[in-house]
Amino acid sequence: MSQVSAPGRDGGDRGSGGVTRRLPPVTELCIGSLALMLAGGVFIAANLPGAVPLGPPAGLLVGGGILTALAMGLLAKARPFSFKTFFQVVRWALLAYLVISGLLAYVFIRDGARGPMLVVLVATLLLFAVDVPTVIAFTVARHQEEPG
């Protein structure tokens, strides 16, 4: 597959024919989601080893989930887009980040995280394991021309 040039000033990608295609802000939404989840993790870490109020990190997690859901919804409607390339990349990246998230969950459990705090941490890791592969795969696929 041939590559298209870097994004134009209008935020679209220019294909080999010079036609601008507008793609949704999937990367920006997923990075926003990651920022919210990171803020929640920092909040939890800042309150350890004492009692951790879970309202703020849970709220940040919900906000991150909403951003991720919005990104996935917009991605599903993106046309033209090389979904074949996207799924080739996301499959392996998702596997890698699920392993990373599983190892981090194991560390949290071994470190004594229990109850609702563990639920928030594991949910954060699952969202992390979806967001990062999505960003990687979207970044690769957006620069591929859609097969005829």
Image (cartoon, helix red, strand yellow):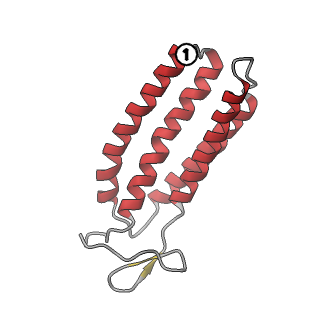
**Vertical position of residue 99 compared to residue 2: above or below:** above
User: Disc 1 marks which residue?
Assistant: 111
Q: Judge left or right: residue 42 versus residue 121.
A: right
Q: Judge left or right: residue 124 versus residue 81.
A: right
Judging depth in this view, the residue of 80 and 127 nearest the camera is 127
Question: Which image quadrant for residue 139?
Answer: bottom left
Q: Judge left or right: residue 43 versus residue 19.
A: right
Residue 9 position, x and y percent, is 53, 80
Q: Within 10 Å of the Cα at label 1, are there few (<14), some (14-19), or many (20+) other Cα atoms?
A: few
Judging depth in this view, the residue of 148 and 59 nearest the camera is 59
Identify the image quadrant of the C terminus. bottom left
Question: Which image quadrant for residue 4?
Answer: bottom left
Residue 27 position, x and y percent, is 51, 58
Residue 28 position, x and y percent, is 56, 58
Tag 1 secondary structure: loop
Judging depth in this view, the residue of 126 and 45 nearest the camera is 45
Type of amino acid at the residue the image marks with label 1: Asp
